[in-house]
Image: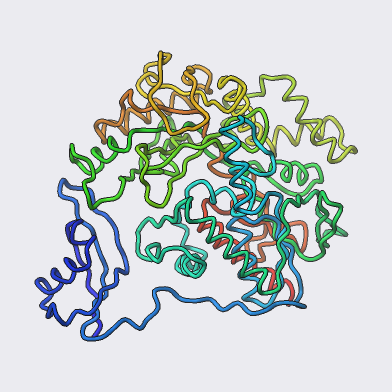
Amino acid sequence: MIQEYQLRVLPEIAADEQQLKTYLSQEKGLNLEEITATRILKRSIDARQRTIFVNLKVRAYVNEKPTDEEFQQTIYNNVEGKPQVIVVGAGPGGLFAALHLIELGLRPIIVERGKDVHERKKDIALISKTQTVNPESNYCFGEGGAGAYSDGKLYTRSKKHGNVEKILNIFCQHGASTAIMADAHPHIGTDKLPQVIENMRHTIIGCGGEVHFETRMTSLIIEKDDIKGIETDKNETFLGPVILATGHSARDVYRWLAANHIAIEAKGTAVGVRMEHPSQTIDRIQYHNKNGRGKFLPAAEYSFAAQVEGRGVYSFCMCPGGFVVPAASGAEEIVVNGMSPSNRGSKWSNSGMVVELHPEDLEQENWKIEDDTLAEKQNELLLAINPTLSTEECEDINKKQLSVLHFQEELEHQCWIQGGMKQTAPAQRMVDFTTKKLSSNLPDSSYSPGLVSSPLHFWLPEFISSRLTEGFKLFAHSSRGLLINEAVVIGVETRTSSPIRIIRDKETLQHIGIRGLFPCGEGAGYAGGIVSAAIDGERCAEAVKTYFM
């Protein structure tokens, strides 16, 4: 007999199968000796009250052994000789597009500007050791995309257009823990995810697909509004329809599209800082216990959101028991992000604390690039792509389509200057930030390149810093102990999402002006995280299949 039960139990019961069997025997009338196995199907923590409970959906096997699979396998057949599709980018959008293309009987050719997931790790380590960033291999560029070495969280609210459970199944099929199928906020971890990504690559190649690393797309091949393929920096040409899944930091791609009059538009995003607390502090706050989380609970998570002066202020990418990492993708910029290993065992917890930004906000705040050299460089970059552009056309593109991108770049450059023109990040104690006081010293931090005391309240744009200050105060009102000077805010968090949307048709998912071009995932402005990007990758693969019909 197999029975399923919805349970609400103490953490120590949820953590031990024998205790769980005993609970089922006592509360559900099952014979303890006849319960041969249990399987947790869904798990979430309820920390709203002082007594913490774990909500479980449990499958109990009575007098029989489990024979059902913990996850469903997807069948991938050989696609050698089948019509080929070019996938630009090997992040979650590109990888899941490629895997689904194989399901659909099409042959994916992945072109990735960065290195494979293991070689990429060496370049990431050098950021802290040498204070330099490899512009083609870093936390943003390389196999696995921005999520590979910045946490691997799989939680998403994006269930409208895709099958989240299928995405999780595919992760499990390639080596992820089956716990992600049960957890309310599934997480693989940066120590485990790289091997899962490599296994996906082996599936793609083993089925007849191709993966080309350290190969950057330099241009699309377009004839009479039809895509023919791409050209690369290795003077190679790959022909076929194109799924463009380049991620939210491929600024050269956005400029190429804009300079060649391919329809894109500025998109809203969010910018701010990365906030870091001792993990014990967050545990005490969230679990309402001065002793913290105890033996049976994981490092505590939080989620904050408020409206301040008409814009959202909220936590983003919360990393319990994690680290703050240097996520710049080029020279003369500082960007911070967060990650957690699978055990979430560090002594710090962090999250992005960001302010919603709309393109029109920049006009209303009369924002412009203060550095004349940077402003001139923006025009030069466009002219290098398309020398036929006039100065007026360049300025129009920069003012309209690329305005939010430029705002990101300016903040990141200012952050680099404030950090001493290397990857040491400017930071400020949390209370000092809200009281507009320079911190005389800083607490220990997980950010390995190092911190330097800086008045973030002064040099961040006022419409960002003032909203952050009010947000911190509101969040501290509901979570007493959050606003403390043992916490630190670190600049800057700018890569929350793409600053550009590559406009596509809602039905065919093709670019509105170019047949055979399928803008995909977070970089195209249609996703916000690993799972939603993976879902969009599958949708684009299905759209390509329709394109061939």
Quarter of the view holding residue 64: bottom left
How many marks on residues? 0
Q: Position of residue 106 (x, y in %)?
A: 70, 74
Image point 62% across, 67% down: which residue?
A: 202
Image point 73% across, 46% down: which residue?
A: 253
Q: Position of residue 52 (x, y in %)?
A: 19, 51
Tell me the quarter of the image containing the N terminus: bottom left
Quarter of the view holding residue 358: top right
Q: Position of residue 509 (x, y in %)?
A: 66, 62
Tell me the quarter of the image containing the C terminus: bottom right
Image point 50% across, 39% down: which residue?
A: 337
Q: Could you tell me if residue 156 is visible in this image?
A: no
Q: Which is nearer the eye, 505 or 241?
A: 241
Left or right placement of residue 202 versus residue 484 in this view: right
Q: Which is nearer the eye, 409 or 169?
A: 169
Q: Position of residue 197 (x, y in %)?
A: 56, 60
Left or right placement of residue 477 versus residue 208 in this view: left
Considering only vertical position in the picture, is 459 above or below 163? Answer: above
Considering only vertical position in the picture, is 437 above or below 12? Answer: above
Considering only vertical position in the picture, is 212 above or below 286? Answer: below
Considering only vertical position in the picture, is 184 above or below 247? Answer: below
Q: Could you tell me if residue 402 is visible in this image?
A: yes
Left or right placement of residue 308 versus residue 396 in this view: left
Its colouring scheme is rainbow
Q: Which is nearer the eye, 190 or 508?
A: 190
